[in-house]
Image (cartoon, rainbow, N blue to C red):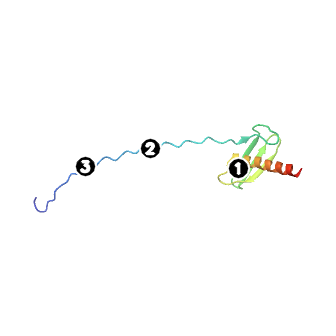
Amino acid sequence: MKRGHSKRINIVMGKRKSRTKPAPKKRMDKLDTVFCCPFCNHGSSVECRIDMKNMIGEATCSICLETFSTTVTALTEPIDIYSEWIDECERVNTLEDDGA
């Protein structure tokens, strides 16, 4: 070797491994917003609405005009409001049974 010249080394770089794209996330089915009234038992007469500005959720029956209101969070869905209404009805009914 001559002075001042370095020996060249050929380095062959491998190809980058191709990454497979992750599978698209499956969309969740939309939950119901219309339910059966616990008072008049009329199917699909209770509509749940969420007022995020005032943080209030309301379930109203269009047949017997019964209503239920509760506080909501950013994660609250209409089914949550309806479920709270049903739970409250059951709680009141058990209190009446215990008192009788």
Badge 3 marks a residue whose secondary structure is loop
Q: Quadrant of residue 26?
A: top right
Where is residue 19 drawn, in percent x and y? Answer: 40, 45
Which residue does the image show at 76% across and 48% down from the upper left? 87
Residue found 73% across the figure and 47% down from its top: 83
Tag in front: 3 or 1: 3
Q: Earlier in the sequence, mark 2 or mark 3?
A: 3
Label 2 and label 3: CA atoms lie apart by 27 Å
Residue type pointed to by label 3: Val
- The residue sitting at 11% across, 62% down in the picture is 3
Callout 2, which amino acid? Lys
Query: What secondary structure is marked by label 2?
Result: loop
Q: CA separation, marks 3 and 1?
A: 63 Å
View extreme (top): residue = 43
Q: Which quadrant of the structure image shows residue 27?
A: top right
> Residue 85 location in percent, x, y?
76, 48
Label of residue 12 in the image: 3
Quarter assignment of residue 21: top left
Please identify the quadrant where the N terminus is shown: bottom left
Residue lying at 27% horizontally and 49% vertically, measured from the top left: 13
Check if mark 2's residue and mark 3's residue have beta carbons within 8 Å. Answer: no
CA–CA distance in space, label 1 to label 2: 37 Å
Residue located beneath label 1 in the image: 50
Q: Are marks 3 and 1 in contact (CB under 8 Å)?
A: no
* Left or right: where 2 falls relative to 10: left
**Three-letter amino acid code at disc 1?**
Ile
Identify the residue under disc 2: 21
**Residue 50: where, in percent of width, then height?**
70, 49
Q: Nearer the viewer, residue 37 or 67?
A: 37
